[in-house]
């Protein structure tokens, strides 16, 4: 269940901004750095977000 909340948090952050640095997610005290990276990797593989150097970007029609 924690993973689903992290996915939702990541995707909602991307609706506010096109790019979110990994540091933004690392500020959450209840999530490890490794869990954040795995979450971003899964979202990238599922086509819901794009993993880039230093963070994650939203997938748009233009990207």
Image (cartoon, rainbow, N blue to C red):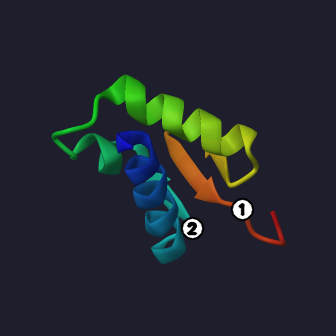
The image quadrant of residue 44 is top right
Q: Position of residue 62 (x, y in %)?
A: 83, 71
Q: Position of residue 58 (x, y in %)?
A: 63, 62
The image quadrant of residue 46 is top right
Compared with 34, 63 (above or below) is: below
Marks 1/2: CA–CA distance: 8 Å
- Of 39 and 60, nearer the camera is 39
Q: Position of residue 56 (x, y in %)?
A: 56, 49
Question: Residue at position x 83%, y 72% from top?
Answer: 61
Q: Position of residue 9 (x, y in %)?
A: 40, 59
Horizontal side, residue 61 vs residue 6: left or right: right
The residue tagged 2 is: 18
The residue tagged 1 is: 59
Question: Residue at position x 41%, y 35% from top?
Answer: 36
Quick one: which residue is furthest to the bottom in this view? 16
Quick one: which residue is furthest to the front in this view? 1
Which element carries disc 2, helix, strand or loop?
A: loop
Quick one: which residue is furthest to the top in this view? 34
Mark 1 crowdedness (10 Å alpha carbons): few <14, some 14-19, many ≥20: some
Residue 52 appears anywhere in the view = no
The first of marks 1 and 2 along the sequence is 2
Horizontal side, residue 26 vs residue 50: left or right: left
Mark 2 crowdedness (10 Å alpha carbons): few <14, some 14-19, many ≥20: few
Residue 2 appears anywhere in the view = yes
Horizontal side, residue 49 vs residue 17: left or right: right
Question: Residue at position x 46%, y 68% from top?
Answer: 12
Question: Residue at position x 34%, y 28% from top?
Answer: 33
**Looking at the rendered structure, which numbered label has been put on residue 30?**
none
């Amino acid at each position: 269940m924690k993973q689903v909340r992290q996915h939702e948090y990541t995707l909602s952050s991307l609706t506010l901004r096109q790019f979110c640095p990994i540091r933004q997610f690392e500020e959450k005290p209840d999530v490890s750095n490794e869990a954040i990276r795995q979450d971003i990797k899964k979202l990238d593989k599922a086509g819901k977000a794009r993993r880039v150097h230093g963070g994650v970007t939203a997938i748009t029609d233009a990207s």
